[in-house]
Amino acid sequence: MTTAIQKKATGYDKYVNWKLFIIPVVLFFVILFMPTPYGMKDVATEYKVGPKSVVELITTQLFGVKASDGEQWQLVVARSMEALMNMGALEKKRFSKINLKWCDKYGIQTDATNIERAKTYIQNQVPRETYLSIMNDALKLRKTDLKYEQLEPNDKKAADKGAWHIKVAIAMTVFVVFCFLTECIPLPAVAFCIGVILVSAGVVGREEVAMLYWSDATWFIMGSLMFAAAFVKTGVDKRVCLMMFRKLAVPNVRWITLIFFIIISPLAAFISDHALAAMFLPIGMLLYQNSLSEQVPEDKELAKMLMITIAMACNIGGPGAPSGGARNVIMMTYISDMFGVDIGYFQWMTYCFPFLFIMIPVTWVIMNWRFKPRVTSLAPAMTHLRSEIDRMGGWNRKQVSAMIIFVVMVFGWFTEKTLYDSGILPVRLGIGVIAVAGAVAYVLAGVVNWRDYQEKVDWGVVWLYAGAIIFGRVLDSTGAAYWLARSALELLGPLGMNSGVPLMITSNGLTAVITNLMADGPAAACVGPITLNMAGLVHPGSTFLPFMAMGTAMASSFAYCLLIGTPPNAIVYASGYLEPKDYLRVGVPMWIVANIVVVLLTKFYWVFRGFGGMPGF
């Protein structure tokens, strides 16, 4: 593992390639100083002025008072309805499900007493038809009636500021993607450029950007790389690797990569892909390091093949079940709240798990096509592993401690949200805190010392992913991702791509592009409401609605092309064997094939099967 990190350092030792770096710098400033498109001002009006205007409309129609004169519980009603409207949940029954945790999540400051009073009022005093009418009026106000040129001076100032934030986010997108693809500047430095740009442009404050760098996802990446280091030091990775592959009669690299896909991809439908990538990274590195010999002291293609296999196996498994990612649950919630169509857990699996059955062999073939290692037999590596484990003898105290801590940590990842929701845990820990707690436990148990973490963890990758998290969140929060999605759909509408399977192709392709730039959940949340609303207009009450929801969720997992696309991509990059262009070698053909597979599933399997007695489209 130490050798791998030293190899990675050669990339970090490079200086800025100004011949290339000047290109994204110039493009960044060109975009900033271009006239602001009206579409950006329109989206900024919706994001910056829309919430206030909607709350004002709701308090006026429901209570006959201005928002500034409303009682606290009345404001809870208005702000909750506004938040539900943004989710597409227009029906009255959805209001009854709000609670204090939900209000905290959406930034509605209140207490349990006012929430209960608000729910009682809506339940007993507001007929369903009246509630729905107000929600539709509010939606129409935010989406169509609010016009930038008609705003009051203060509101126009807020909209101009929001449009500037969108422009900065778009300019930053061009800058970041170019830098990631060309490595014209050391990649961790790009992560810091993101923070400097956002603070300097006034998009976020210095305190906020510092907090964003240390998000739960960043802690998870850091903790995962730490426990991988502990596995390597204790030799647990060797034992697990031998258990996985000892039954292979011919341990050829092709069959070993196929086993990776067969084991990892189905598990990724039920277990965090972050955790799986962190678990299998040391195993892949171990296989590579033990396959080298005096005759072949280095085989970059083999190293890349093993690392990319682990990442892509994690990535293709997520669509298989609702538990495979936040994107799946988000789209299930949208389709239920917007149209009252419920998709059950097992029902989702029967529609989406066939995607894995197709993508596992297809991705395996692509992997063997794109990488041509010199070493094809890993039999010497397995022999070497057996001899090392024989010398180890039985499981020692450190190895047992490492496994116990790991099992407890995985259990925490699986259950912390459920325990919090049920009230057993008073605070939400998050998977990142649990990962770092596990890393601390390894130190307390004497499994590792800090020198092990310092030398065996690629801290550059931690910062790199921290920057990627900020980048994606700013695209989402400023409305830049929404502007990109809306602009693309408006552009493609006149070409006949606004109904039926063409609309699904457009939606999936757009989602699959955006998800390479930001987390899968926000990508689905960005495109989903737009396309579902379009689907409801052109194919109301038909099977197209659940098909669109499942298709959008699946497409948001197609982050195959950039190392910032998913945590597994970033985690395997920490091996030190990969370059950003290696993701493109496999990611581009996979991206194309995956989009085609979803369309074929829709046209030949989903349409043939139907959905719960709903009419076809």
Image (spheres, rainbow, N blue to C red):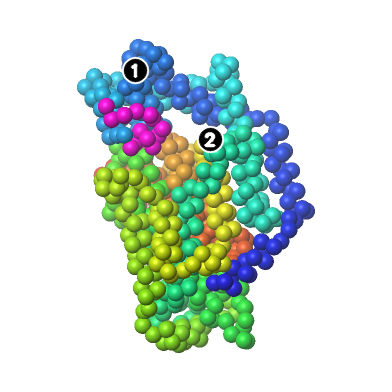
Check contact, mark 1 vs mark 2: CB within 8 A. no
The span shown in magenta is 101-113
Residue drawn 44% across and 76% down? 235
x, y percent for residue 451? 54, 67
Residue drawn 56% across and 67% down? 455
Q: Secondary structure at mark 1?
A: loop
x, y percent for residue 4? 58, 71
Camera sees residue 93: no
Which label was assigned to residue 479? 2
Q: Amino acid at mark 2?
A: Gly
Left or right of residue 588, residue 394 in this image:
left
Residue drawn 40% across and 73% down? 398
What is the residue that sits farthest to the right in this orientation?
19
Which part of the image, by quadrant, shows the C terminus? top left
Please say whether residue 170 is one of the residues in the magenta stretch.
Answer: no
Which label was assigned to residue 71? 1
Left or right of residue 558, residue 581 in this image:
right
x, y percent for residue 222? 49, 57
**The quarter of the displayed image where residue 331 is located:** top left
What is the residue that sits farthest to the left in this orientation?
124
Q: Of residues 98 and 211, which is closer to you in this image?
A: 211
Please say whether residue 102 is one of the residues in the magenta stretch.
Answer: yes
First in sequence: mark 1 or mark 2? 1
Q: Of residues 447 and 361, which is closer to you in this image?
A: 447
In the image, residue 20 sits, relative to residue 139, either above or below, namely below
